[in-house]
Amino acid sequence: MKNKSFLPWIVLFLVCLSSIPVILHFKGFTSARIIGVIVVISVVAALWFWKINSRKKSPRNNKVSLSVNDKHWMIENISFYKKLSKQDKVIFEDRVGIFIADVTITEIGKEKPEKETCIYVGASAVIAFWGLPYYNYGDLREVLIYPTNFDMDNSLNKRGIVNGKVHHGGLMNNTMILSLPALERGFQIDNDKHNVGVHEFAHLLDKSDGDIDGIPEYLGEEDKKLWVRLMKEAMDKINANESTIPDYGGTSEAEFFAVITTYYKECPGLLKRKNRPLFEFLDEYYNQDN
Ligand SMILES: [Zn+2]
């Protein structure tokens, strides 16, 4: 609610208030009482409108507080978190708590999702968007956690080739699906450049500007041109088998962005040695909040 919508109420309140002594002076006790009642009703109505409007403007729920045990568990299981400074750890915990409160996490086959699963999903989101000035997780509303991999039509299949998916358009536009074993593996095996949670959230970062095209949000025109050139060169190298970037990154620009983001977040030192220009671009991109 903008402040100016309070103005009529304040004017009414002041007019009523200032008229009371005048009325009292002319011994109009009944009128003064009526004006007093009007003032009280106006203030109550103004507060009520403000409450309704502020609720509409901020749909965020209260963040979920992580317990000491949760934080200890994160140190053991989320190496990105473990490496952060004390100050950054607090920011990370806050963002995970906000994510878990804001986004519905549904574990198929369970009445309630496991806390660890929620933290894995929240941590994936926070890692992918870490260092950016704003984050909305591509308007994500729900993450479905499947007990196994799945097929392209989202049906469960232990041997299915899909372990994570974001939707663009259609009924499931605001939904992500992750396979639980793959999500856990992404964190348990740390330096392999693979993490399906971070990978899918990188797609959502790419989607934040309206297209999943390998060109993410928050890039100026010049940087976009540079990024497209770096991306094309790196993809050519992947497809010529001359790269340390996982092959899947050579299949499309969208996959390249998700693959290289996961690589940068998991093994920044290796990327710095293997492809300095790409590393420097990503390092600047993912440190915009400094
Ligand atoms: Zn992908």
Image (spheres, helix red, strand yellow):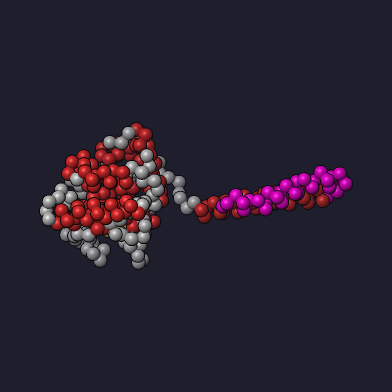
Question: Residue 216 placed where, x, y %?
Answer: 32, 54
Residue 18 within the magenta-colored segment of the rendering = yes
Q: Given the current orientation, which residue lies at the most extreme left position?
A: 241
Q: Is residue 266 visible?
A: no
Query: Which image quadrant is residue 277 in?
Result: top left
Q: Is residue 284 left or right of residue 56?
A: left
Note whether 4 is above or below 154 in the view shown.
above
Q: Given the current orientation, which residue lies at the most extreme right position?
A: 26
Residue 273 within the magenta-colored segment of the rendering = no
Q: Residue at x 86, y 48 (%)?
A: 28
Q: Residue at x 40, y 48 (%)?
A: 134
Q: Is residue 264 left or right of residue 111?
A: left
Could you tell me which quadrant the C terminus lies in?
A: top left
Q: Nearer the viewer, residue 209 or 237?
A: 237
Question: Residue 54 placed where, x, y %?
Answer: 54, 51
Q: Is residue 147 left or right of residue 87?
A: left
Q: Is residue 230 visible?
A: yes
Q: Nearer the viewer, residue 236 or 10?
A: 236
Give the magenta-colored segment's residue range.
1-30
Q: Is residue 132 left or right of residue 214?
A: right
Q: Main secondary structure of the magenta part?
A: helix
Q: Residue at x 23, y 47 (%)?
A: 278
Q: Given the current orientation, which residue lies at the most extreme front position?
A: 222
Question: Residue 214 placed where, x, y %?
Answer: 28, 56
Q: How many marks overall?
A: 0
